[in-house]
Amino acid sequence: MPLNLPERRPLIAPSLLSADFSQLQREVQAVESAGADLLHLDVMDGLFVPNLTFGPPVISAIRKHTSLPFDVHLMIVQPERYLQEFAKAGADLICVHAEATPHLHSAVTTIKKLGKLAGVSLNPHTPLEVLDYLLEELDFVLIMSVNPGFGGQKFIPQVLRKIEGLKERIVKRGLSLLIEVDGGINEETAPLVISAGADILVAGTAVFGRSDYASAISALRSPRQV
């Protein structure tokens, strides 16, 4: 891997989508000081998902204010058109959706050629089988535990079986790729996805919605058992 991530698990990736956009520099530096492992950046185009967020200029602007790895989640149609731009803007991990491109293998190959960690995301309804031919090429898989497009949604419990199934595939093939989970992650759902096999937890309101970011991150990393 071209990027050395912390060895501890799970890794916590606060989602910038839930931050105060009028104070992005302060918010980014605050979660870094609070112990975040990565910063999750949701890029939405209003086509693949019914929402618009930000693009390479915003990522480039905040890149100079933190040393956190940037986990860039592209919820956009034909993401292969912009991979070089996001890499140049400061992305360290780049994730594309299996549902968003007819050239998934090519997109993954391009991300790796750019020297970035390559990931593929699956919507809740998308079966794991679409990745069976590609798992050896990936650094991580992002399992959506809500329907993508908006923050603050309720966790879909049926996704736990998908996380478990992916973990089984990884172990059976002797792979080292990471499992990332995004959607409805909080102190109640964190232990469930960790138990199922998750390595990276994406959390928006569970971090940025709390007054004490350090306490929020700590609670997700070592959640109470339910």
Image (tube, helix red, strand yellow):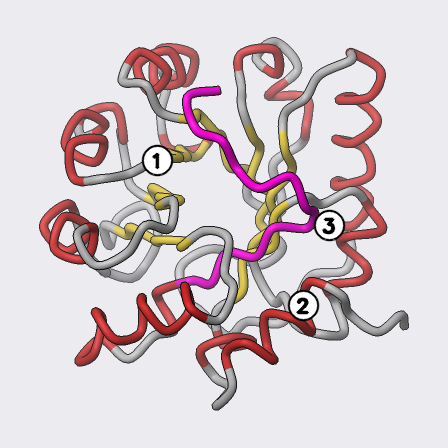
Q: Which secondary structure lies at badge 3?
A: helix
Residue appearing at x 57%, y 49% in the figure = 144
Label at residue 159: 3
Q: Is residue 179 left or right of residue 137?
A: right
Mark 1 vs mark 3, foreground winner is: 1
Q: How many C-alpha atoms fall within 10 Å of the one at disc 3: few (<14), some, or many (≥20)?
A: many
Give yes or no for residue 223 being in the magenta stretch: no
Q: Position of residue 91 (x, y in %)?
A: 29, 38
Q: Which residue is mark 2?
A: 220
Q: Which residue is mark 1?
A: 92
Residue appearing at x 25%, y 75% in the figure = 26
Q: What's the distance in space between the residues labelled 2 and 1, CA to CA?
A: 23 Å
In the image, what residue type sits under mark 3? Val
Q: How many C-alpha atoms fall within 10 Å of the one at disc 2: few (<14), some, or many (≥20)?
A: many
Residue appearing at x 41%, y 21% in the figure = 2
Q: Which quadrant is the C terminus positioned in?
A: bottom right
Helix, strand or loop for the magenta stretch, by majority: loop
Q: Give the mark nearer the N terminus: 2 vs 1.
A: 1
Q: Which secondary structure lies at badge 2?
A: helix
Q: Position of residue 9 (x, y in %)?
A: 70, 47
Magenta residues, start to end: 1-15
Q: Which secondary structure lies at badge 1?
A: loop
The quarter holding residue 113 reads top left
In the image, what residue type sits under mark 1? Asp
